[in-house]
Image (spheres, rainbow, N blue to C red):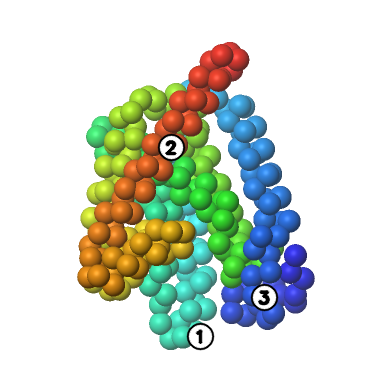
């Protein structure tokens, strides 16, 4: 684990000597193990929570995440502007994991169809994004384990997984295949904003333009781009998202069946 001379709130470029040493470290795996144990304990304790209380949890988490995002973005932007003179475009809330802010806010305070779509995304896309980042914890490539930058990522993505699992375990949402379809529809609606921005401004939010860092598929996307078929990249990425949503649904169904067998519900 990195033991350099730095403060908890230091910006990544101000942490002298850190080049990603904590990525893949014991600390990263301990975080994952502790998170899994904590998640299981919380879900067991809260599994019989009534719907009105679950709704309050959704509302409080949505407000916390909005405040948390604003605080982190402000903190990082101050350094970015001071050091480079410009705002870091990738801090905009247009990636998959930022969607949880909007989805939880709508799930907590909207009604009917919009509420149902956002709840479905939280139980599918939210869990997908949360798990992927918790496992990879890419923030450790830039920040040491004991730093605000790393803790932000660890807390944020844990909450994504927790919130989605809570809605499923407490039967707040009905566990049927409509959950996947509604969640994916919400994802596609958000993508209608992101995809044009990616292609117009040469960005890669939600990995629609280059499928950045996705093994094998990143190379396929690169070949499509070389052949002038870059429009196929977002289609391929959407297909991968859809597959991931289905995997989460199947795992949830399996867990619910096990819970019923052992009379945990």
Residue identifier under label 2:
247
- Which element carries disc 1, helix, strand or loop? helix
Tell me which residue sits at (32%, 67%) in the image. Answer: 223
- The image position of residue 71, as x and y in percent, is 50, 63
260, above or below 56, in the image: above
Q: Is residue 61 visible?
A: no
Residue under pointer 1: 83
- Where in the figure is residue 15, as x and y percent of width and height? 66, 77
In terms of sequence position, does the residue under pointer 1 or pointer 2 come before the other? 1
**Foreground label between 2 and 3:** 2
In the image, residue 245 above or below residue 228? above
CB atoms at circles 3 and 1 under 8 Å apart?
A: no
Residue that carries the numbered disc 3 in the rendered image: 18
Residue found 46% across the figure and 59% down from its top = 215
Q: Residue furthest right?
A: 3
Quadrant in the picture for the N terminus: bottom right
The residues tagged by marks 1 and 2 sit, at their Cα atoms, a distance apart of: 43 Å
């Amino acid at each position: 684990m990195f033991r350099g001379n730095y403060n908890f709130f230091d910006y990544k470029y101000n942490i002298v000597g850190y080049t990603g040493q904590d990525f893949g470290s014991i600390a990263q795996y301990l975080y994952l193990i502790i998170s899994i144990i904590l998640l299981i304990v919380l879900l067991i304790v809260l599994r019989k929570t009534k719907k009105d209380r679950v709704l309050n949890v959704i509302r409080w988490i949505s407000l916390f995440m909005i405040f948390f995002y604003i605080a982190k973005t402000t903190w990082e932007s101050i350094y970015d502007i001071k050091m480079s003179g410009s705002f870091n475009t990738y801090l905009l809330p247009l990636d998959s994991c930022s969607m949880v802010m909007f989805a939880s806010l709508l799930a907590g305070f909207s009604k009917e169809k919009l509420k149902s779509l956002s709840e479905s995304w939280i139980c599918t896309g939210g869990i997908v994004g949360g798990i992927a980042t918790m496992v990879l914890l890419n923030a450790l490539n830039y920040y040491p384990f004991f730093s605000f930058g790393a803790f932000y990522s660890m807390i944020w993505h844990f909450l994504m997984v927790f919130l989605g699992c809570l809605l499923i375990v407490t039967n707040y949402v009905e566990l049927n295949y409509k959950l996947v379809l509604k969640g994916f529809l919400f994802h596609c609606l958000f993508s209608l904003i992101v995809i044009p921005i990616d292609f117009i401004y040469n960005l890669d939010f939600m990995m629609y333009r280059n499928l950045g860092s996705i093994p094998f598929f990143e190379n396929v996307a690169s070949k499509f781009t070389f052949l002038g078929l870059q429009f196929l990249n977002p289609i391929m990425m959407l297909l991968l998202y859809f597959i991931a949503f289905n995997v989460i649904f199947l795992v949830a169904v399996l867990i619910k069946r096990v819970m019923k067998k052992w009379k945990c519900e």
